Amino acid sequence: MSAVIDHGHAGHDHHHGPAKGLMRWVLTTNHKDIGSMYLWFSFAMFLLGGSMAMVIRAELFQPGLQIVQPEFFNQMTTMHGLIMVFGAVMPAFVGLANWMIPLMIGAPDMALPRMNNFSFWLLPAAFGLLVSTLFMEGGGPNFGWTFYAPLSTTYAPESVTFFIFAVHLMGISSIMGAINVVATILNLRAPGMTLMKMPLFVWTWLITAFLLIAVMPVLAGCVTMMLMDIHFGTSFFSAAGGGDPVLFQHVFWFFGHPEVYIMILPAFGAVSSIIPAFARKPLFGYTSMVYATASIAFLSFIVWAHHMFTVGIPLTGELFFMYATMLIAVPTGVKVFNWASTMWRGSMTFEAPMLFSVAFVILFTIGGFSGLMLAIAPADFQYHDTYFVVAHFHYVLVPGAIFGIFASAYYWLPKWTGYMYDETLAKLHFWMSFIGMNLAFFPMHFVGLAGMPRRIPDYNMMFANFNMVSSIGAFMFGVTQLLFLFIVIKCIRGGKPAGAKPWDGAEGLEWTVPSPAPYHTFSTPPDVK
Amino acid sequence: MTQHPRAWVGLLLSLAFSPAYAGWTVNMAPGVTEVSRSVFDLHMTIFWICVVIGVIVFGVMFWSMLIHRRSTGQKPAHFHESTTVEILWTVVPLAILIVMAIPATKVLIEIYDTSESELDIQITGYQWKWHYKYLGEDVEFFSNMSTPKAQIDNRAAKGEHYLLEVDEPLVVPVGTKVRFLITAADVIHSWWVPALAVKKDAIPGFINESWTRIEEPGIYRGQCTELCGKDHGFMPVVVEAKSKEDYAAWLAERKQVAAAERELTSKQWSMDELMERGEKAYATACAACHQVGGEGLPPMFPALKGSAIAMGPAEGHIDIVINGKPGTSMAAFGKQLSPVDLAAIITYERNAWGNKVGDMVTPQDIVAFQKAQE
C-alpha cells in the first residue's frame, strides 16, 4: 500500500495541496475535503428536514386544519423523518469519521479514498431524487418514515418508485462508507496504536460500521420486495397473494433497530472524548465502555419486535422481546455511570463542547428512561404510536445524536479551521437549543400519555395547550440553528488563532498536528507509546 | 377553537383560559377495567423507578458540576477504573429489571387470555372508518366520524368531543367479557381505547384478538393509532358501555332496523328518493376521497364529475363501485354497503354535479348484478 502512495508522490511532487476550483470538490479523494463535504451536506439536510418540522409544528400549533391539508402533512412527517435520519444524522457522523478517524489513529487518509469520494457523491443524487418526489403528481412519500406495507405498496403514490431507488442509493453509500471505516481502522493504525488504545470515537465507529454493513442490505432487501410487489406482481407483503404485511415490519425493524444505534453510538464515542477533556481527568472505565458498546450493538439485533408489540405477536415472542429490550438498559446504564464518574472530582470548565456533552448525558438518559418504560410490553400498549413515542425518540435523537454532533463540531472546529469559534455565541446557541428542545419535546410525553396518537394533522382540544407549547419550543429550536451556521462561517473566516491543542485537557493524536490540520497529515506514521 | 383572527397573545390567553376541556393533563388515566388499572400500575411503577434512578444519577452529576469545577480551584483526581463499582452498577440495574419484569409478565399473560368470552365482536378497519359486527347476532354497522367539516376547517366552533365523536358507537354490555376479533380491509389500522388499555393492530388478511370487561357504563373514546393514509387523524373509536338490560334493548332495536333495511331493497324507488339518499350515503362513504363536489384529489383520487365511468354505461359504473379497482385505493364497496345505498350512490354520482346521465340504478339492479357475479 505505502509503496503505491510513494510512487504516486514521486511523479507529482507539485500536487501536494488541494486542486483549484470546483473540480477539487468533485474529484477529491482527501479525507478532510470529503469529511467537510459530508458535514456541509448533512447541515443542509438538517435545515431542510428542520423546515419540514416547522411546517408540522405550525399546523399543530392549534386544533383544526390551518396551513396544510392532511395529504401534505403526511408527506411532511415522512420526509422529515427520512431526511433527518438518512440525510442529517448519518452523513454528519460519516463526515466526523472521515475527518477524525485518520487523525485519531495516525493514518494518512482513509483506506479506500476513491470509494470515499463515490460514497459521498451518491448522497446528493439520492436526496435530489427523494426531494424531487414532492413536486411530482400525487406528491411524495406519505406513508411515514417507517413506510409500512400495504400503505407504501398498494396504496402508495406513484412517486414511491423514486423513493425506493433513493433508499437504494443511500444504502450503497452507507455500506461503502462503513467498509471504508472498517478497512481504515483495522489496517491503517499507526504502530503502537493497539485496539484497546484507540479513542472511543474510533471504537464506537468501528462497531457502528459493522452494524451498517449488517443491516443496510436488509433495508435494501425490504425496499426491493416493495418494488417487486408494486411493479412485478409479487405478494411479499400482501395477504391476498399469500404474503404477510407483518413480514414487512419484521424485516424493516431488523434494519430499523440497529439503525437507531447507528445514529447514537458515534455520539457516545465523541462525548467519551469530550467529557474527559473538559473534566481534565481520564475517562472512567475505558474497557467497560468498549464492552458496553459491543453489548448494545449485539442486543440491537435481537430486540426489533419491540416496535411491534401491538401487531399480535404470540405471548412467548412478546415476552422474549420485552426481556431482551429491558436488558439494553444495563450496558446503557454502565455508560451513563461511567460518564458521571468521569465528571466526579474533575476540574471542569463548561465551554460549548462540554455544555452539549453534559446535556447529551442528561437528556439522553431521560430518553433512555422513556425507552425503558416503552420496553414494558403491557404499558407499551398504551404508549405505542402516541406522542409519548415521539417524545422518546426525539429525546434520544435530538439531545442524543444532534447534541453529540454539535459537541463534536465545537470540539474539533479549531482543528478544522485553525481559529477558535465565538464562545459567547456558541453558549447562546447551546442555551437556546437546550430550552427550545425541552420546550418542544417534553410536553409530547404529556399529550402522548393523555392519548394523542402520532402522525395526525389535527387533534382534540384537550391536547391543545401542550401542542402550542411544543410548537413554540420547536420554532425556537429551529431558528437557533441558523445561529450555528453563522458561528461556523464566522469561525472559518477568522478569529483567535487556535494552537495545535486549543483544549488544555484534550488527549489524542489529532492534537499533535497543527491547526488547521494540513491537507496531508501523518504521511509518516507517528509513534504511539 | 377560534374562527376570528386574533393577536398572538390573545390567542394564547384564550387557549389557556377559555374552553374548560383544553386541559393540562400530564399523565395516563387509570381507565375503567381491571386490565387497564394493572397497566396503569405498571406504568407508575416503572415511572417511579426511573425517577429514583434519575434523581440519584442527575444529583451526582449536578453536585459534581457545582463543586468539581476549575473555577472553584478543584484539582482533578486521577482515578479511572474500578472493577468493583463496574460490577455493582451492572448487577444492581439487572436486579431492578428482574423485579420489574415479574409483574409485567403477569399482566401480559392476563391480557393475552382471550378465552371464555361471552360476546364476540369483529372489528374491521377501513380507510377511514370502523366496521363492527356482532358475531352470531346478525347486527353489523359502520362507525364514521361525525365531526362536521366546518369545525375542522375552523368555520364553526369546535365541540368538546371534536374528532372523537362518531355516528354509531360500538355498544357493549358492562360486566361481560367481550372478545374483539380485529382485522382490516385495506391498510393496517390500530384500534385503541385508552380507558380500556386495548390497542391492537388491524391487519388486512389476519385476525388479531383482544378482550375487555368494562365495569361502569359510560362512553369511552379513542382513535386509530397506525398511520393509514390521508384521514388517519379522522377515524375515532367510540365505545358505549351500557347496562346489560339497556344493551339487550339496544340489540333488539338494531335487529329491527336491519330487518327494515332489508325490506327497502325490494321497494320501488323514485329518482328523487334515490338522489336524496345517495347524497347522504355519498357523503359518508365516498366524499373523503372523491370530495363532496365530485372533483376528487387527482391523481390519487380521480374526479367523478365528468368522469368517463360515471357518465358511461351503468354496468361499468356498478362494477367499479362493487368490486373496486385492485392496486389502487378504490375499495370494493359491494360488501361494505347495502344494495340500497349502492344504488343510491351510483344514481347520485351519475346525476349530480352536472353529470346528468339521466338514468337510474335501483337496488334490484344491484342485487341482480351481485347474483350474476356469484
Image: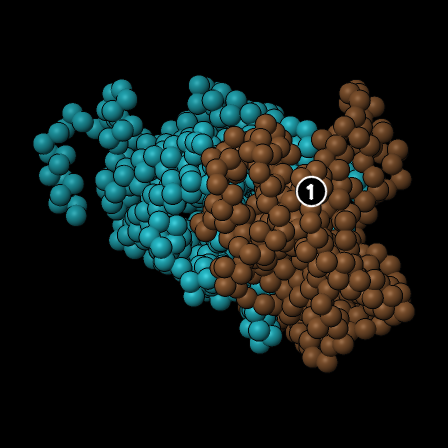
Q: Left or right: B116 with respect to A32?
A: right
Q: Which chain does the cyan colour mark? A: A
The relative height of residue A294 versus residue A31 in the rendered view (above or below) is below
Which x, y percent locates residue A367? 63, 51
Which x, y percent locates residue B351? 60, 34
Q: Residue at x 53, y 55 (%)?
A: B369
Label 1, on which residue? B270
Q: Left or right: A11 with respect to B178?
A: left
In the rendering, what colour is chain B? brown
Q: How many marks?
A: 1
Which x, y percent locates residue A21? 27, 20
Q: Quadrant of residue B294?
A: top right
Q: Residue at x 76, y 49 (%)?
A: B166
Mark 1 belongs to chain: B
In depth, the one of A510 and B126 nearer the eye is: B126
Q: Quadrant of residue B109?
A: bottom right
In depth, the one of A217 and A155 nearer the eye is: A155
Q: Residue at x 45, y 25 (%)?
A: A419
Which x, y percent locates residue A337? 61, 58
